[in-house]
Amino acid sequence: MRSLSGKTSSSVEDIRSNIEALQVTVNKTGSIIEKGIESSKISMGKSEEGKEAFQTIVSDLTNIGTQSAETLEAITEQVQVTRAMSDHVDRMKEANNANRTLSINSLERTKEIVNNLESLQRLVTQFSQS
């Protein structure tokens, strides 16, 4: 009986030791799980920050795209205005050339008239002296 009692006592001590070891392991596991939960919360926060940053980038890219389209439209309008101005300048050159030609013709005719008037004046002077 003593031997049975010693074995029982030893078995109880082994069981107690195993239970304590399990409690330490359970406590460590609980601590690890708590750290994992905390890490998950941090990761979720970082993911949310990343999501917000990504949304900001997408919004910025959308704004850049809109601004680029507006800039393209403004450039296209500027090109059209520049072409119209160039056409107008070309027409003004043509009008200036036509005016120059007309002015030269008018000057030549005026010289002819002056020559004719001078000839006429000489004739009048001759007839009046005669």
Image (spheres, helix red, strand yellow):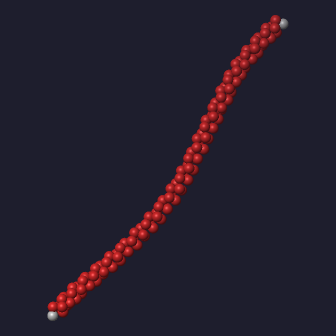
Any part of residue 119 in sight: no
At which x and y percent is residue 93? 37, 72
Q: Residue at x 39, y 71 (%)?
A: 92
Instruction: Examine the rendered structure and indicate whether residue 1 appears above or below residue 19.
Output: above
Look at the image and tell me in which quarter the N terminus lies.
top right
At which x and y percent is residue 43? 63, 34
Look at the image and tell me in which quarter the C terminus lies.
bottom left
Viewer-nearest residue: 10 or 45? 45
The quarter holding residue 114 reads bottom left
Q: Residue at x 60, y 39 (%)?
A: 50
Seen in the image, is 14 located left or right of residue 70? right
Viewer-nearest residue: 130 or 18? 130
Q: Residue at x 63, y 38 (%)?
A: 48
Residue furthest out toward the bottom: 130
Instruction: Examine the rendered structure and indicate whether residue 130 appears above or below residue 61.
Output: below
Instruction: Please state the total of marks drawn on the protein image.
Output: 0
Seen in the image, is 49 located left or right of residue 104? right
Seen in the image, is 32 located left or right of residue 113? right
Q: Residue at x 47, y 61 (%)?
A: 78
At which x and y percent is residue 66? 55, 53
Viewer-nearest residue: 2 or 56? 56
